[in-house]
Each structure stands twice: as C-alpha cells, then as structure tokens.
Amino acid sequence: MNNEIHEECGVFGVYAAAEREVAGIVYTGLYALQHRGQESCGIAVGCNGRITLRKDLGLVGDVFTPKVMKTLGEGRMAVGHVRYGTTGGNDRDNAQPILTKHPACTMAVVHNGNLVNAYALRRELENNSAIFHTTSDTEMISYIITTRCISDGSPEEAVLNAMDILDGAYSLILMFGDRLIAARDKHGFRPLCYGKTPAGDYIIASESCALDAVNAYFIRDIKPGEVVVFDETGVKSLTAHCGKVTPSPCIFEYIYFARPDSVIDGHAVHQARINAGRFLAIEHPADADVVIGVPDSGIDAAIGYSAQSGIPYGIGFIKNKYIGRTFIAPLQSSREQMVKIKLNPITETVRGKRVVMIDDSIVRGTTSARIVGLLRDAGATEIHVRITAPPFLHPCYYGTDIDSAGKLIANNHSVEEIRGIIEADSLGYLNTDYLPLLISGDVNFPICRACFDGRYPTQVPGGEGKEKFEC
Amino acid sequence: MNNEIHEECGVFGVYAAAEREVAGIVYTGLYALQHRGQESCGIAVGCNGRITLRKDLGLVGDVFTPKVMKTLGEGRMAVGHVRYGTTGGNDRDNAQPILTKHPACTMAVVHNGNLVNAYALRRELENNSAIFHTTSDTEMISYIITTRCISDGSPEEAVLNAMDILDGAYSLILMFGDRLIAARDKHGFRPLCYGKTPAGDYIIASESCALDAVNAYFIRDIKPGEVVVFDETGVKSLTAHCGKVTPSPCIFEYIYFARPDSVIDGHAVHQARINAGRFLAIEHPADADVVIGVPDSGIDAAIGYSAQSGIPYGIGFIKNKYIGRTFIAPLQSSREQMVKIKLNPITETVRGKRVVMIDDSIVRGTTSARIVGLLRDAGATEIHVRITAPPFLHPCYYGTDIDSAGKLIANNHSVEEIRGIIEADSLGYLNTDYLPLLISGDVNFPICRACFDGRYPTQVPGGEGKEKFEC
Amino acid sequence: MNNEIHEECGVFGVYAAAEREVAGIVYTGLYALQHRGQESCGIAVGCNGRITLRKDLGLVGDVFTPKVMKTLGEGRMAVGHVRYGTTGGNDRDNAQPILTKHPACTMAVVHNGNLVNAYALRRELENNSAIFHTTSDTEMISYIITTRCISDGSPEEAVLNAMDILDGAYSLILMFGDRLIAARDKHGFRPLCYGKTPAGDYIIASESCALDAVNAYFIRDIKPGEVVVFDETGVKSLTAHCGKVTPSPCIFEYIYFARPDSVIDGHAVHQARINAGRFLAIEHPADADVVIGVPDSGIDAAIGYSAQSGIPYGIGFIKNKYIGRTFIAPLQSSREQMVKIKLNPITETVRGKRVVMIDDSIVRGTTSARIVGLLRDAGATEIHVRITAPPFLHPCYYGTDIDSAGKLIANNHSVEEIRGIIEADSLGYLNTDYLPLLISGDVNFPICRACFDGRYPTQVPGGEGKEKFEC
Amino acid sequence: MNNEIHEECGVFGVYAAAEREVAGIVYTGLYALQHRGQESCGIAVGCNGRITLRKDLGLVGDVFTPKVMKTLGEGRMAVGHVRYGTTGGNDRDNAQPILTKHPACTMAVVHNGNLVNAYALRRELENNSAIFHTTSDTEMISYIITTRCISDGSPEEAVLNAMDILDGAYSLILMFGDRLIAARDKHGFRPLCYGKTPAGDYIIASESCALDAVNAYFIRDIKPGEVVVFDETGVKSLTAHCGKVTPSPCIFEYIYFARPDSVIDGHAVHQARINAGRFLAIEHPADADVVIGVPDSGIDAAIGYSAQSGIPYGIGFIKNKYIGRTFIAPLQSSREQMVKIKLNPITETVRGKRVVMIDDSIVRGTTSARIVGLLRDAGATEIHVRITAPPFLHPCYYGTDIDSAGKLIANNHSVEEIRGIIEADSLGYLNTDYLPLLISGDVNFPICRACFDGRYPTQVPGGEGKEKFEC
C-alpha cells in the first residue's frame, strides 16, 4: 500500500474567550484532522506571552498521553498540527508547530502547503547569516516574519509584508503573544475555515469536520489572500496583496484528501464525491449487477454511480481497521496477500456478479490490479473499474506527494493499456472537464487541477524535479 | 461509549507442514480477529516440544513488535489469542495462551467462551491442593486436562475426558508437544473452523475471515462436541460425549460480534445482517426519505432495509477511525460531544429528510439518544430507529459481557418508553421469532437467544449474578 | 567482568504499627540490599487480607517508578526482594515475591537461599498433580506451605511442618493475611535479622545495613532454625525441628557478599575484612612500599594489611561508578581495555613502587591478570597479590553461583601456577584455618566453608552437577 | 543532597586515522567523563562531510542504547558531550553537541565553560536578525563562528576571529566537514588535553582519565589561548589573541570536580588532594584517633591528613552506589534519613573514637550537619571537621554552579558559627594562601580562586546576579 497519495498537513487553532485547557480542544481537533497527516503532530499553548510546545513523531493519541497533556497546562490560545512527511528519524525536527523565540517576536507557526520559491529564498537568507535548523519551509516563513517584526512593528503588518514574498500554497495559523493570526495564500490551494464554540472560543481549522468535533459552529472559510486576526478586541479581517487574488483551490481535496463530512469553500465533500459517481455513470456506463466502492473514498462515489445508473449498491470489501503503521508484513506473505489482509472482499456481494468497482485513483497500477484480483477470486464474473478522477500526469507542488511525472502510470500507458495491466473488463476515468462541476454549476469555476492538466497557477521549481522543502 | 457489548476472545492456531515462521502466520490471523478482543493478546510457538510464549496487554500491533516477534523463533505449531476482559492492570495474568509445564503435559491453551460451572469446579480443585494463578477459567481447563494426562495417557483422551466435566461455552485450541487439538463445546456456542494454506499448513480460527487473511482456503467448521487432532499423521476427528450434542450457536455472533466477511457454520454474516434489515422493513416499515446505518454493524442491515423498502440508502455518519483506546476525553467535553467526536453525521445526507436509522442494539439508551440527537442537529426532520435484534432482557453466561438483567434498559422500560428516552419518532426491534430465519429457512433452527428470551441451553450460575471466571 | 561471584538474593519485610505507606519503607530497604541482587526485584503490600504485588526485571530504581509505587497503595505489611539469577527473558517469572492465592492461604513469599532437595521434592509434588509456573524453588516452598495450611490450620504450624521437609539454605519472609513470618534454616546459611523503627514498625532484613537505611534500630538476628511471627499481638519466637539445629553460617558473606557496614550474627563485616588483611600480612608478608585494595571489597582488607605490616595504605584504583548493566563494550575494545574502563589505576600511587594488591578472590584468573597488567603499565615495579579467602575448590549449593569444580582455576593449577598466570611477583591466599578467626576468637567456630574444603553441612544433589532450582 | 556543587560539562573528540566506529570511542570516553555532567549527553559523528547527531536527557548508558549507537554509523571524526544543567524538560534543547547546517559551515560544537559576555552578545546578534533556538551560549558561539566562516573563509580563521569577541571560560571541540578543532580560552579555566591511540587516532578530552579509558596515551594539555587543528595533514597548533594570554586555571577542578586519576596541566589531581590533607593537618591539627573522608572526594585528602599527622586512616562511610537520579525519597523520610540512605557510617570505625572527618566543601551547612550527626549517632566521641578548600564567598561565572553570594553560608556566618551550626567539635578550612601549593611549589602560581577571594580574572556580568546562559 505504498502507492497511496498523501495530503501533507492539517492545522488547527483556538483563541479562547478565557484562559482554559485549550490543549484539550486542539487535541480533539487534531483527532478529527488525523487523516491529513499521520507522521508527526504537535501542540503549542500560549499563556501570558509564554509558549509551551510538545511535538513528536506518531499519531495524536500516541504522542499526547495524559502525562504530556498535563505539561501543556492552561492558556488563552493554542495551535496544533498533524503532518505527513518523508519517512526517517530526522523528521522529528520538521514536526510542527515551529517555535520562534526572539525579543521582537515570540511565535508558534503551523502550516499546510508548500512554497514554490523555497529554495531561492533559503539561499538568499543563508547568505545573510540565517541558520536554519530544519529542512521545512515553515521555518523559513517564521524567519521572514520575525525579520519583518523587527522592522515593521505589528505582527499583522509583518504577516502581510511576508506574504508578498512567499509564493505557493500556504494555509497558516500563527500564534503570537497576544493574538492568533490565520492566513491563506492568494490561490487558496489548501482549505482553512473558522467557527466559534458556545463558550465563545474561536476555532480555526483546515476542515470543518474539526469544528464539528469540538462542538464549534461554522462561521466561514478564510478567503484566498485573507489574513484574519483573533485577539482581545475580537476578529479582524485584512487583505493581502492589495486584494489581487486568483483563487484556484485544489480539486483533489474534494476527490480524496478531505473527510466526506467536511464542507470546503461552501461545497460539501460528500456531495462532490456522489457527483463524481454520477458523472462516471453518465460517461462510463456499465452493464452490471452491483456497484461497490473501494474504502474509504470510493464508497460515496459508488452510491452516486448506483443512484444514477440504477444498479444496486453493495458492500464489496471489509477493511481491517486495526492495520496501521504497526503491521509488520510477515516474511512469507506476498504483496498480493498484504492487500487481502487489509481489504477482504465479501463473497456474498460479488459472487457470480458483474461488478462496477469505484476507486479514487490509479497511481502505479499494482494496488488496483491486486484489488481486481481479489474480486475475481471471490467469484465476480466481470469487473468494471471506474476512477473518480482523471489520470495523474503531472507532479503537485502545492503540498501533496503526487509524484514526479515519470513514475505515474498514466504518463507511460494508455487507458486501454492500464485496463490490461489491472486486468479489469473495462476502465473509465472521470473527464477533466467535469472537475469544476463536482462543486459548482459553472464549468469554468476556477480550480487547481494541475496534476491532471499541467496548468500550474504559479511559477514552479525548475529543473531538478520536486522542490525539497515541504509542508 | 461504555455501553458497547464486547465479545470476549478470538482464537487462532496453525499446524504447519514444516518448521517455519509460524508466529508470523498467527500474527496475521490475530489482526483479522482483533475485533473479538482488544484488551490483551498472545502467541505461543511450539518447536520440538518446547513452547515459547509472548503475551501482554494491548493490541496485536502494539504487543508484537518486530523485536518481540523475533524472540518467538520458528516452529511447527503455534496458537494465538485476542481477549477482551474487565479492565485493570492485573489482567496481564489473565492474558492467553495459558502455558502449562508439567512432566506429563507441556501445553499452551487458548479459549473463547465461558464455563458455567467454573466456580464449583475451582473450589473442588483447590480443596485438592490446586493453586491457581489467575482468575481465568482457562487455567482451570488446563489444570483438569493436565490431571487427565497424568492418569489417562494420550492428550486426546485427556481432552475428551475433561470435556465431560466442563459445562458451558468453549472453543479451544490446545497445543501439545507434537500435536494441535481443537475442541468445541457440545452446544457450539462460539464459532470455530479450519482450513489449509497452499503450503499445506492447517489453520484453525474463530472466524473464516482469519483464514482469508493468511490465504488459507476454508475446509469446514468444527462441529459442536467435536475434537479435531492435527499431527504428523494428518487430521483426525473425534467425538465427545458419545455424540450426544445439542447445538445452539449464538445468534448474536451474526448480528454483532463477527466480521461481515466471515461465514459461520455455513451461513454468511453479511447476508444475515441484510436479512435482519429486510425483516425490519417488513415488520417495522417507515415513511422516510433515506435509510442510514450506524457504523459498523448497522451498515449491512441498512442496505437490506433499503432494498426491501425501496427507500434510498445513504451514508449517514463518518466514524473517526483514529479514535481507539488512547483517546482521552477532554475535561470540558460532555458525553454528547464524545459521541460526536467519534461519529459525525453527514449533513448532506440527512438535512431536511425523514431518516430510518439502523443500529444493532440499545443497551442503556444513552448512546442511542445521543446519536439521534446528532441527526436532529444535522437537520433530520424525522428519525425512525430500527434495531437488528430483539431487546436484551437477560445476561449472557457464554462469553460475552451482556450485563446482568437490572442494568438493561428493556427490563425497566417498554419499547414506547425507550422510544421516548432516545427521542426517536418511532422505534422497532427485530422480532425474536425471526432470529432463526436470519441464517436458516427453518423457523425452529436451534440457536442460543437466551439474552432475549432467557431460555438458557445449560444450567447457569445461581444467586450472585454473573459468574466471575470469564473467557 | 563475567568472572564475578554473585550472591543470589536479599529479603526485606515490614510489619507496621499502623496502616501506612509500607511500600516506601521496603523500597528504601531494597536500595540498601541492592548489592545482593541486581537482576530483578519486587514488592508485595498486604492490606486487610489483600496483597498487591509489583515485580519486574531491573534495579529497584528502574522498576519502582513513582507511578508503580502509587499502585502499591498503603498497607499494614509488606515484603520485598532483590534477586540475582541466570540471565534470560523468562527470568521475570522467577522474580519474587511469589504470590499464592488459595482459599486456605493467601501469601507472598520472599526467599534467599537454595534448597538441596528441590529436584526430588518437585518430582514428587508434580506426580500429585502440582503444576509449577516457575523454575524457582520458592514456588515449591509456597506450594508445600499452602498444602500444610489446608491440613494443619495456622500459618505458623504450616511453616514449622514445611521446614521438616525443606533441606538446604533458606532465609524466608512470608506475608499472610494478618501476620508476617520470618524463618531461617537450621544451618543459618544466609543472614536474617530484625529491628524496629521509632514509629514502632518491625523490620526484617537480610542485612543490618537495611535496618539502618530505614532508620530502624537493630534488635537481634533470627536464629538458625527459628521462626519469628509478627502480628497484632506482637512478636513471637517459635523453634523448628524441636530445636535440633546445627549452625554453619556462610563465611563468604563476610569476605565478599555483605556490605561492610552490616553486622551479621553479632560480627561486623568491616572488621572481618580488616582481620583478613591482618592475617594475610602475618602469613604472607611482603617487602613493599604501598598496600592497595581492589574496589570494593579489597579496600577494607588493604587497611588491615597496612595496619599490621606498617606499609602505607594508598588508593590504587578509581572505579567508574557509572558502568553498570548498560555499558556496551565497544567493538574494537579488547577485554583488557574493558577492565581499564571500569578500573583505572592512579599512577601517582603506584609508579616506581613495590605494591601489595589485595583482592577477594580469583575465579578463573583472567580478571586478576588484567588488573595486575594495569598496575604494571602504571609503573609498579613489583606486584604482590594477596587474596582474602582460600582458593575455591568446590561448588556452592546454598544460594551463590560459585561454579562447578571444573571451571575453578584452583582445581587445575597450583598456587605457583596461578601466580604465573596472573603474572604477579608473589601470591598469597588466606589459610582456611584462619576463616573462623575472622569473626570469632574460637578456631573451631562453626561456619560453612564448603566451597574451600568440600565439607558440606547437608546432603548435596548428586551426579549432574549443580541443582537447577535456585534462590 | 541538593547542596552539591556541579561541574557543568565534559567534552570529548576523536579524529581517527581511518573511517571506523568512532562513536564507540566517544561512548567510552563519555563514560569516563560522566562525573562532569549527568543531565544530558550527546554524540555527533562526521563522515564525508555529513554529521549524524544523537543527544538526549539522561546518562550515557541510558541514552546510547545499542540501537541508538547503530544509527550513528561509522566515520572519521566524532565529538561528544556530557552536561549538567538546570533541571527541566526543555533542557533537551540545550543538550550538546550543537549542530549547525549552513552552506558556508556544517559543524558540531561541544563546549565546557561559560561566557561572561553572553547576554550582551545575544542581544546584539538578535537585533541583527539572529534567531536562537536554545538558551545555551554554545549556540551563540556556533552562530558567531558561522558568520565568520561566511566572511573569513577557513574554519581556523573563523575560530581565531571568534575568540576575540568571546569572553569567559570555554574549552571547545569543533567538528567541521574535514577537520576537528580544539580551542581553550586564554585563561585556561577549564581543562583540555589530547593524546593518541596505538591505532593512530587523535583523542581530545576534558580530562586525561578519558584518554586512559580509550587506551590513548597522553600527549599534552592544550594551552590557554591555543587552537589545535586535527586534519588529514596531521596536527597544527595556532595561537589566538596574538599570544596575549593570562592563564588562571580553576583550582576547584583539583579539589572537587576532576577525577582523582586525571592529570591536569601537568599536575595529578590525586596528589593535589593528598596535599590538601597534608596542609590541613599542618594548619588545623587535631587530637584524634582516626581520620576518615566523606566519599568520594574527601577520601584522598583523608589519606594525606593521616600521613602528615600520624593518626590512622579509617573507612568511615559506605556510600550506596545504586542511589542515583531514580531514587524517590519516601514520603515519611526526613532529610536526615535521606543522607543516611546514601551514606551509612561504619560503626566499627568510629565508635568510641575521636574522629577527623575530611570533606571538600560546606555550601549551606545542612548536609554537613547531617553527616556529623550520623557519626555522633554511630558513637564518635569527638568530630573534627576539616574542609579541603577555603570558604565559598563569591559566585562562579566560569561554568560551575557555585551559587550567588547570598546563599553561601560563609557569607553570613563566621567559621565558629558554622562549626556550631554543623555541631562539630572543631572546624578548619584550607587557607586560601595554600591553594597554589596544592599543584605547584610556587605560592604565586596563577590560578582562579575567585569563588574564595572574589578576584575575577575577567569582567563579570553586572547587576542581576549570575549570567543566564550556561555551559
């Protein structure tokens, strides 16, 4: 299962109406965002200008034991982060929040996204004596904001000025001594929204499902290019780049990354996936007996395909919910068997039937081939694979790990060849033209779909492939 | 979420065609049975008459790290166990397998079930100088078999003789120096089946889904009152109690405990749940817009209800898959909020709709009330709750933790009162008479449904409530 | 440093005047007895008939964290144990106290010593259906006392009767529901004494240094063959074997095992070692410039040798106090270097001098040779080795790990040959005849010196070498 | 025992003749230097320009498990550090080596000492946009050297230039991509020496005992104001400050901090302590029966006092060698008892005797009073306390934690008053004038004794007490 695509961060913040156990609120919020990053996590609590930080490799429930939670104490504000990153022990240093202690600026920053000009910025700063301790572009963002704090005065001025030189994807929450600032890049690549609890605490989160988890009601999304300041006086909205913004939110948040119970920029993720299933049923119909979805993200689309086509929906697989990072593949097991340990088909559903199987993507083809094989072994007579996205053709530079072009199966094979590789009876991808319609009635609705069509909304790093400084 | 009902064990064994890393096979099998017990787990490997045992509190993936797996080495046979039990540190002692080292009998035993004459047996044995180290009835079973080994000779004779004095529910796998013996009580309360891998290894498991996980094909269920011996000479079936058996398998395995991809005694669990949904649609129809299931076990039945009633099926909830044992409820959170952190409704599915919500049981009513509340908050206009089982009225003495009568809501309240307590618009339970029909065409098919109708297939412990010695 | 000789247990008990944190008292006492066993440790607290037990592999300070201490709670009584044993993971099972839960007898037992008839007793008990969970003879002692409790009634009767069939070395503390019983075998091989704190708590311990540590004043040693009962009514002394006792305390406790600040059976350990040095100076004088001791046990004797001979005493070595179990020998280091990491000579003391070096034993000769080499490298011109004991010629069956005869250097080599092997200029052992004089004016004072002269005070296990069931 | 004085670091480095397991050499060296810091430790290995670093809170043996050692791999160079610091979880960040990754300078630094101009330097650097991640002055040293590397080119130039603005105590080892540089401040406050192993590896260490541990022979001390470069071409000595140096090594290294088997700047520590005892015997004679030393550092001086006075030397105390960081003081124990758990008097040595007790310092008086009390309880008739140093009157700014003036007993009490407080029969301190004579025949030999006489060899931080940035 190494072929999965990973989102690379979730951010969460709270500015409370009074001093309280804000760490517990962040903890709950991070549980709701855990799907956005399982590599490391962290929480920073601000109390009277002092910041207490705990972060480590591992899931929220493993890192934040009762003992660790106790050390975080009470506070007026807090920020938290979950992260997916490249594997390796050094990753601990790249865990967030990133804490900066400087006479002009004590600050904890959490970031979801990826700068496209990180490499050039870093070299320039280092030539001016900056020393970085991590390979994370979040540390660079912190450094730039700190230098602006020395020269420009107020934290919000520093953030607005810094945004002029940061290029790429960033949904940020910055905790200063006496205020919390949320900022979203002018393209709005990654989601960011805020709400309020009955107790009057403001909550900022990557996805609305995290507001639900802490019992906050949704107020609104942070707009592309917007800076929102939460402090003693209330909530204040500022506009970066003199308001010159060009929104292009990532469509793959709807197709794969986000939780189906989230609503992003006004559009329900669950509905977008049902729509994907409906469009697939229209463009790639199949003569079949049952529609099944590959858990988790194929399930919603399968219901859409079933509703549109009239073919009954069935439960095709049981996913073993205990298999996580800790599962050790037994020596004697083939990779085929590994898929089976994770996903077991329900024979009753597919035996002797023609099956439509909905999945969200085909990255290299091997996993899809194994899943098709499982269904065949369970007695399915035909298997019609439908993918809720177009083929991946281009790398993503905005905070996901969609790989460089050469490794993507669709760059080297036609759809018919891929069908043959995965041994399906038919294969249909979602048409790129339908993508805006998943979330809007307007076929020209601006979204980022660069991984499918290569039209990047920003300059992208040249030459040597993917930019190194992630998340 | 303390109101859940827990199955109290899963067993797994392997008798390999040659010496190999049998521990890895058990490891994978226990992952597939993890839903049957999350409190503790253990693996014992037999190699040339020596037994190596590792067991501890925790999930399989937490206890069996690569380092621990390495200590288990290779072998010809192995047994494993997952357990749910009462909480508390001492539970480590009650973890299984139970190892016995005695000149007449070196043996590792795993057990799913509960003896009903444990208390009387223990007192009798203790008066004869037996000293027990745990409160588990499995140790008693081991003791009795050991004494029979001293007097009776062969392990299979010892097992058959011991079965004459063990009363209650037991699906056992016993690993001796040179053979593996599987035994199922004469009522067949708990499931037990076996299969074979392409490499020729025999696999015994509580559920067939564990055979799938290790790539074994299913051979057959072990019959009530049957003893099956796996050794160098092959497989041998013996009959206990001179063949006087009275099968009464637990129907709640189908409704709740087992995995939907398992097939028990020839009947598919997934199909039994779909049937439950269909029967509910017939007996308790509803005028509604969508049918949803409470994850996980309500999902299958919701599809059955939808198919029978014609009301569309929808995804009602997203279950947070990261919330396990480690989640610490934040201080300020109410129990209502806790339910919401675990289960978040999908507003798109239920807003403005009349909803049929399928669940598997109502134990005390509080959790159900909270879930109904979540739907109401998400905008459902009517909520019709349908339960895939009859009301619990009696405690279970056969290896589940269905509580003593006084604490069960249905003993103190009418269905209409319960409807009021959970604030549903209507409430319907499955009729007890339909229970045999979930798995058979014969309305008189013998099953144990004592928790619903109080007709216990055995003597049960008197007076002081539930027997203490579990699993 | 594998050539060291290990004592194999320390026991400690408290019977408090009132319910209090008795675990803390045991904890402190075990710290003072840690030198008697570093492999595993345990504490059992008795409170109103219930016993709470915690034990594990490791040093007292590692096993008994504040968190673990808290789980032990308060109580009226407690017993504790430190153990040295054969290495290996399974050793956890052999850790003490051994807890027995039986309707006739709930009891925690700690034991220092070794039965010589353990093998025969175990086979007999197993034939009568006893199942043992450990390889420790302490479990057998517990089993026998439990069976006596069923038949004989009072715990003290049970203990006295059991002592008639237990042969060998045992200093026991047994905690029952309402009393603490201390028992010492009729030979008094291992020490055992008791005292009382200002708060009125009775303390029983292997060595008087542990009384000091908990601020108790010494009352007296428990006599060979004596049973002392501590309960609500006070202290009661009973006599086993109708008073037929034959004391033969282990002389090596004085020479090596015990702490120099302890007083055993009325004789100060420190003084015994000084005496050993004096006798060595008389029998093996040397023409030298400085006397040094090998830490720790050679130091006291060096002062005695210096006082008797008039040769100045000097500090010869610095022992690295941080090197314990955790030190990993670097790949490139020779065993010579390992000795140097642990013991570094002080050049100032020995350079250009003729040195008398006092040590407590030569087991295989290799360590002694390396230490002599260090002195030579540091510039000593002559090295005269003096050993505070006679040569080891026979294995010990009474609770130490003095090895079987074949592996002891003195069985295969003359003193002159050993001198050559360790490359000393001269070598002198203490004369066996002087041994009683270390602690008494009477040259016929009865002691066990079987490891030197082979005259065992009991039957010893035949044939196959050392008895398996230790401590 | 909070009254102890702590040295605040030990440094160790190796430049090997070929690529090998240099981490193992550092590991062994740090074991030998563990007495200089028990709070945290770290090792950095340099291999082909890449640096691998592991550091954590804890003792060397706890932090550097075999698993951690394996991650360090092989290399040509390595540096290591042990640290004592203020307590608290955040201290992990202050652990050393400090690693700097910058295009102009990849470097790992270890430091023993304390800058006296740290506060002013830090503020100045921060105003120029420097962001520091720790409160350690070592990070400032790293920062300054990095900026010099950008502007000045070669690492040795950078180090020499940096030394011009660093004021205070520093013995540094700096590991660059292809060379190791050792530097000692112009006062030579802290020791630093180097040697060579038979395999040709150069070893740099705080004390010569660490050379012994890795089997290196001593070459020479690094001189005050000297910079020594170890690289492919061999060893090169450079002179900072144009050779204007004013040596004033810390005399308390000899009296207390260093190991007695070390030789510093040509003077043996053991001999210096014996000399201290001799001078005490001359200036503060006593009419007594035995001389004892308080372990560990009082032992050597007691031998000197005995030799000079003719009063026999005795072993007065047994120190419990297992009591380290992990010991939890039992609730009911008084601080008096705590001293006794750690140090138990040997009654035989002192009962009925007039005792001279040698210790190295009296910080607040409470610990000394308790030790005197122990001797009195053990039967000493008179106790004459002799201290191997003059009274502390002034704080130390050069890397030890000798406290601010107000808390030192000698600032508020006369010697006679202190004698009364500790309830000794007489009390004698070493005369300040004798201090140079401990290590030299020249009474004007330059040493730093500012903690005794307040004459600081450098500017010291003003006003607000002790400088914050330590080690």
Image (cartoon, coloured by chain):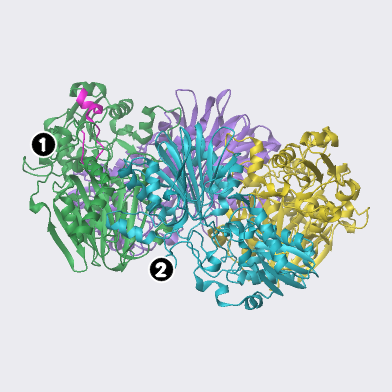
Chain colours: A cyan, B yellow, C purple, D green
- Mark 1 burial class by Cα count in 10 Å: few <14, some 14-19, many 20+: some
Answer with the quarter of the image where residue D390 lies. Answer: top left
Q: Which residue is mark 2?
A: A462
Q: Is residue D21 above or below residue D357?
A: below
The label shown at residue D434 is: 1
Q: Residue at x 65, y 45 (%)?
A: B342
Real-space Cα separation, disc 2 to disc 1, in angstroms: 72 Å
Answer with the quarter of the image where residue A174 lies. Answer: top left
Residue C222 shows up from this direction = no
Q: Magenta residues?
A: D395-412
Badge 1 marks a residue whose secondary structure is helix
Marks 2, 1 in one chain: no
Left or right of D422 on screen, residue D90:
right
Left or right of A10 on screen, residue C329:
left
Q: Position of residue A357 (x, y in %)?
A: 71, 66
Q: Amino acid under label 1?
A: Tyr
Say which chain tag 2 marks: A
- Residue D55 colored magenta? no
Q: Nearer the viewer, residue A380 or A157?
A: A157
Badge 2 marks a residue whose secondary structure is loop
Please say if the residues under marks 2 and 1 sit with CB atoms less than 8 Å apart. Answer: no
Q: Is residue D381 above or below residue D61?
A: above
